Amino acid sequence: MTFRQALEKTPHLENAWQAGLGALRVEDRPHIKAEDTRRLRGSADVDKALQQKEPHANRWDFGIGYRHTNRSKECVYWVEIHTAGDSQVKVVLKKLRWLKAWLAGDGEELARFEREFVWVSSGQTSFTLTSTQLKESAVLGRQHKGRLLRIPNARPA
Amino acid sequence: MTAENTETAENWNDITTLNIQNLGQVREANLTFGDLTVLVGPQATGKSIALQLLKLMVDAGQVQAELARYGLDWSGRLPEFLDVYFGEGMRSVWRPQKSSIEWEGKKVDLAQLARRKRKTKDESLFFIPAQRVLALRDGWPRPFTDYTPGDPFAVREFSERLRVLVEQEFGATGDLFPQKRRLKREFRNLLQQNVFSNFHLRVDKFRSQKRLVLGAGEGADALPYMVWSAGQREFVPLLLGFYWLMPPTKVSRRAEIQWVVLEELEMGLHPRAIAVVLLLVFELVARGYRVCLSTHSPQVLDALWALKHLRESRTGPEALLNIFEAPHTPPMQRLATSVMGKTVKVYYFSRETGRTNDISELDPSAEGEGEAGWGGLSEFSGRANEAVARAVANAEPGGES
């Protein structure tokens, strides 16, 4: 099953698929750079698609499908573009918990892919690579990528 | 404040630049010095050469006079001069026709510097080298002449300075640490807690030989140099260097000294001890010295990054002191306030390009080479975070790995 087919089987996201980075807000697109854009397998605005169903939830932003050169199946980059301040660490962790719960329920088709949970900073970052906050995030499976997520051709081991 | 110390770094803080091309491992370094300047980068990328060159630019006459005083003769030739100044074999750092140096915007003819003796013999830069542990042998500072002619000038000079300090000021047996007239009480307490663990450092006599020893107090057994911890052996020469820079009088600093170079302040020290040493460096900056550091410690850049943001958000001095777990006493508040007003520059020496990058913004999201990973100091942490995050994300139910 492809990323697009999985989206079409997911409640409320049946029509969310967009080619390339088309589902991202225009202002968010500069934060994502794919090494080979031809390998992008589309994107979905999860936040927007589920706004009506879960208006008060801490919803995650986007899913982006990518076919790495060293994988036969697609990988999904779950991307949250958010200010990266100390006070936001807990907010983004709440969003991650929501995303994981959603993937275990309605989003189960999308949970079958290899994945990365990535927080991309929309502005200044006010913690460092050695900070405890980033360690806390890492043990929950979330990476922080500065202001730019570079999606490489080959998936790191 | 006395007349002697009213001149602060700001007075001579006209922009000072050192530009180096093709010297040793450095292909191109463009350094503009702040009140505090920090050099980072992998081993053997030219940081130490740059700092020793700074000493030579500032103190050429004093260096020549000291070398001559101890009978070193380079016959006015540059290769021999480089060997006696930087150390044996270092003549190869200079590549004729290719190497060049600019100091304060003016080209420096190094061959002429080696040829012609300078009239001025004043010293205005105090250099604390990375090899400072060599300055003590059997617990006593080694004189300049105790080294071989091939040993770097910076090491020999520092060692000699400590010998004179200990012999002249602490000649009679007694405590070197703690000492009421040396360092602020707050520093003494912090050092006691984090470096000496309630031991005293004192001059002692073994038969007729004077030596520095550690002891738990009056009458306690003396612990000679060979049983000190590695950190204590590293720290004692550094402490003596700080003593020399902070005289026990009402004068807050040595008026003739404008610059201090401290290589690898973290050597052998636990992070808590590093924090105290960094606070002592801030004390030097607050006293008006212009300080240049090289470091491999991410902790130093963590502190500078915090200093930058605290300054930008106009936070009070307490926030800075909290980072160091330092007391909020009036002297420490004055110290923190002063440091928050100083300029800080950070340079990354890249092994890949042989060039320096100005990473003073210390932006963890920066794209430029070396800045987000702080010259490689936190890249490892970044990769560790990433590896764990990826593994956890795909180890949970539903994730295929």
Image: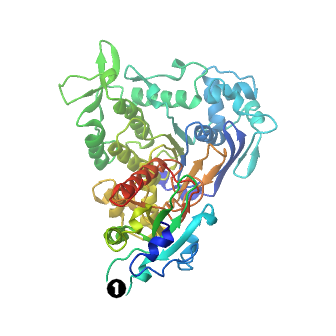
Residue closer to the observer: B92 or B71: B92
Which residue type does callout 1 highlight?
Pro
Residue at image location 35% in from the left, 15% down from the top = B209
**Quadrant of the snapshot with the N terminus of chain B:** bottom left
Q: Which residue is mark 1?
A: A55
Circle 1: element type = loop
Residue closer to the observer: B376 or B53: B376
Is residue A39 at least partly visible in the picture? yes
> Would residue A29 be found to the left or right of residue B237 on screen?
right
Quarter residue B76 falls in: top right
Is residue B335 at least partly visible in the picture? no
Residue B136, given in percent of the width and then of the height, sits at: 42, 24
Residue closer to the observer: A71 or B30: A71
> Would residue B37 be found to the left or right of residue B306 on screen?
right
Residue B347, given in percent of the width and then of the height, sits at: 58, 51
* Figure check: A92 above or below B139: below
> Would residue B213 be found to the left or right of residue B30 on screen?
left
